[in-house]
Image (cartoon, coloured by chain):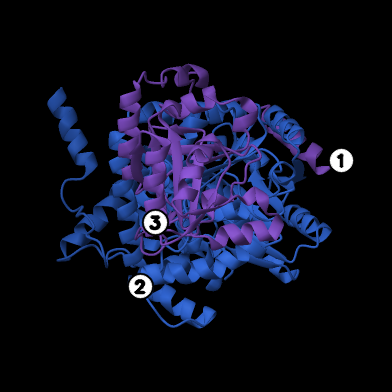
Chain colours: A purple, B blue
């Protein structure tokens, strides 16, 4: 008999003894009580902004692609850097031309392969990415691994993430309800810059991933 | 460093004499408790999340066989390979087989207690495969050849000076005790390893039954780098780590970080549902899930103790435990420590090797109060104490004491005489009644006043 069968048989024997734990409500009933709160767009933006600051992230807003490009270019220069790796997507596409015009060289990881790709993205200290949706309750960016290069999201030291205001969701219950099943199966959730408190519980930003995460909310 | 649960008394004595460790543990646990309390206070419906977590875990566990088969099918459908391991040796052999089959020479690992449980690192290193822990705390304890002393904060027992010394000695860098500089050293050393590694190994916090996905929570980005850069990803998962569905996952994504680190959400939540390289040209082209039993199905057989399998390894019960706060994690002698560890040790290792563990508790109930999964840890500790006694593994002096008490309790006259005598004797003493190993540090209450029998008779008279 193979190990799989032995383990399953052992579990089945164990489960012949019914549980002696007290009765409790079904999880589905309990989860209904934790429903998605009805929040207006401004409430969601305010919540997202506050939570982003609470997790040591940074928050900026832009009313147009031009304004976003201006603010992002200033952030990239502050790193300091003259180039940035970029993720694929319509929000990044919308700011790309203006960023290039401002002298920021954009590197698309998809144009490179294998070792060249990861080594290049790791070398460039800034990344400009976009997030298809975000959770206001925790300031979490949700990125499905849908074929785009994920490396600009976690290899650079400074990551600037474009978020569309209309794609803000209230909480994780709403996120998993709204997201198509195939998309949520491979998903990266990011909440703030990487960190550690492994030395005497002292919080230090920038453990193995980005030390700065700036969310740029696009109001349009 | 090989620890033995049966040697826990020696470790406790050693820990109690080590003021530096006690200070470090005390400071770290108090900080963790304060941060958790701060978050619990602002999260609406915290108690409802706890109830949901317990009910969801119970639902999975009550039909674990069916849920594992469903999880396996969904993983296969997602292009992942599922392996089943009855014990630690089989799990190690599976991982080695994957490594050998792909000419793996270097492995980066993210923090996983399950892989600590099966001693995977040492095994792979002995087989000639460079295996590096990448979580900062784990990296430090690996350099020291120690095991983690806390479920979520592996180097909690060490000071910045200890870490500075080990980096200087083992990595050949100039001594520093500045935390940011220490992190920068580790980051630089490990970044090159991440980019060059052939295989990444992770644990699994939650396996989603209805979707065949593995969920890995972390803050440092080392799990992301271990999962998302090498060509092979191996996830080692205890069979109890399943949760029913994406619909219920938000409860666990809240319960674990709040309880573990006082965060509303960990920085990274990695949801892995298949190989990425074919789609994106990066990340793993193979994803393997190793399902580990290693005694878990035996624990499931007990209708009450099976609740100990609901544990999500947050470490909150360690932080709040007055015993853990004094002795730290190594005193327990195994990879799972603190109150929940004290329930798991005799169940995994047997009542002989784990005979002391259920007694390393004051039974104050703080662990149950804080447990995000509402596990009745004190009750389970009592049950396991009972099991240890029934197995004849309790201490001879304890057995003799109980036998004497039982003999006297059945003979009222002798009992009265036996309880009268110490009372009279204590009157002659100025201080505490001398009990070797006990009264040196404690004030034992005096019992030379009115005894229970006398008071009871008086009360009885009054009530007539």
Secondary structure category for the residue under label 1? loop
Asked if badge 1 and badge 2 are on a common chain, one would say no
Badge 3: chain ID: B
Residue A100 visible, this angle: yes
Label at residue B178: 2
To which residue does mark 3 refer?
A: B324
Whether B274 is drawn above or below B98: the answer is above
Say which quarter of the image contains residue A16.
top right
Q: Which class describes the residues within 10 Å of circle 2: few (<14), some (14-19), or many (20+)? A: few
- Could you give the CA–CA distance between mark 1 and mark 2, rounded to whole angstroms? 56 Å
Q: Are marks 3 and 1 on the same chain?
A: no
| Residue at 40%, 58% in the rendered image | A77
Q: Position of residue A162 (x, y in %)?
A: 45, 40
Secondary structure beneath label 2: loop
Q: Residues within 10 Å of mark 3 (few under 14, many from 20)?
A: many
How far across and down, in percent of the image, does residue B456 sit? 21, 35
Q: Quadrant of the C terminus of chain B?
A: top left
Residue A216 visible in image: no
Give the spatial CA distance, label 2 vs label 3: 28 Å
Chain identifier of the residue bearing label 2 in the image: B
Label 1 environment density (alpha carbons within 10 Å; few <14, some 14–19, many ≥20): few
């Amino acid at each position: 008999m193979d190990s799989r069968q032995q383990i399953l048989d052992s579990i089945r024997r164990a489960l012949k003894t019914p549980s002696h734990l007290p009765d409790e409500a079904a999880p589905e009933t309990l989860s209904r009580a934790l429903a998605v709160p009805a929040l207006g767009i401004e409430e969601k933006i305010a919540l997202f902004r506050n939570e982003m600051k609470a997790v040591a992230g940074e928050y900026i807003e832009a009313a147009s692609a031009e304004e976003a490009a201006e603010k992002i270019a200033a952030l990239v220069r502050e790193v300091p850097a003259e180039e940035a790796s970029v993720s694929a997507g319509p929000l990044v596409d919308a700011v790309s031309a203006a960023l290039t015009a401002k002298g920021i060289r954009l590197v698309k990881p998809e144009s490179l392969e294998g070792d060249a790709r990861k080594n290049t993205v790791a070398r460039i200290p800034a990344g400009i990415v976009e997030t298809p949706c975000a959770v206001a309750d925790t300031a979490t960016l949700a990125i499905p691994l849908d074929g785009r290069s994920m490396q600009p999201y976690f290899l650079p030291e400074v990551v600037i993430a474009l978020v569309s205001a209309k794609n803000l969701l209230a909480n994780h219950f709403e996120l998993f309800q709204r997201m198509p099943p195939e998309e949520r199966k491979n998903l990266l959730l990011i909440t703030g810059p990487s960190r550690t408190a492994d030395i005497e519980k002292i919080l230090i930003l920038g453990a193995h991933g980005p030390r700065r995460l700036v969310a740029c909310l696009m109001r349009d | 460093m090989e620890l033995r649960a049966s040697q826990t008394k020696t470790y406790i004595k050693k820990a109690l004499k080590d003021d530096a460790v006690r200070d470090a543990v005390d400071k770290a646990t108090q900080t963790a408790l304060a941060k958790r309390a701060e978050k619990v206070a602002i999260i609406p419906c915290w108690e409802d999340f706890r109830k949901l977590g317990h009910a969801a875990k119970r639902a999975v566990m009550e039909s674990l066989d069916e849920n594992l088969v469903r999880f396996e099918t969904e993983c296969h459908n997602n292009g992942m390979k599922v392996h089943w391991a009855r014990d630690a040796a089989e799990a190690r052999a599976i991982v080695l087989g994957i490594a050998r089959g792909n000419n793996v020479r270097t492995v980066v690992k993210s923090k996983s207690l399950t892989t600590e449980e099966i001693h995977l690192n040492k095994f792979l290193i002995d087989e000639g495969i460079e295996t590096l822990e990448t979580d900062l705390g784990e990296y430090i304890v690996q350099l020291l050849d120690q095991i983690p002393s806390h479920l979520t904060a592996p180097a909690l027992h060490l000071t910045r000076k200890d870490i500075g010394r080990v980096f200087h000695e083992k990595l050949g860098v100039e001594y520093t005790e500045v935390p940011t500089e220490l992190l920068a050293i580790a980051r630089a050393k490990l970044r090159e390893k991440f980019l060059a590694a052939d295989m990444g190994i992770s644990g699994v916090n939650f396996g989603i039954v209805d979707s065949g996905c593995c969920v890995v929570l972390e803050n440092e980005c080392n799990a992301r780098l271990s999962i998302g850069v090498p060509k092979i990803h191996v996830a080692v998962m205890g069979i109890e780590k399943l949760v029913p569905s994406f619909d219920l996952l938000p409860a666990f994504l809240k319960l674990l970080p709040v309880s573990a680190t006082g965060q509303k959400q960990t920085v990274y939540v990695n949801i892995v549902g298949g190989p990425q390289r074919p789609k994106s040209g990066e990340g793993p082209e193979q994803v393997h899930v190793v399902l580990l039993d290693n005694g878990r199905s035996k624990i499931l057989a007990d209708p009450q103790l099976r609740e100990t399998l609901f544990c999500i390894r947050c470490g909150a019960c360690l932080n709040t435990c007055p015993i853990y706060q004094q002795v730290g994690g190594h005193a327990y002698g195994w990879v799972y420590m603190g109150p929940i560890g004290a329930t798991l040790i005799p169940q995994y290792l047997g009542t002989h090797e784990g005979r002391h563990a259920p007694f390393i508790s004051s039974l104050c109930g703080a662990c149950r109060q804080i447990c995000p999964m509402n596990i009745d840890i004190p009750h389970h500790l009592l049950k396991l104490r009972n099991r240890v006694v029934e197995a004849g593994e309790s201490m001879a002096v304890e057995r003799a004491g109980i036998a004497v008490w039982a003999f006297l309790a059945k003979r009222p006259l002798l009992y009265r005489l036996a309880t009268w005598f110490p009372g009279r004797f204590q009157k002659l003493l100025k201080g505490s009644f001398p009990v070797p190993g006990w009264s040196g540090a404690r004030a034992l209450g005096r019992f030379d006043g009115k005894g229970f029998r006398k008071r009871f008779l008086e009360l009885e008279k009054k009530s007539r």
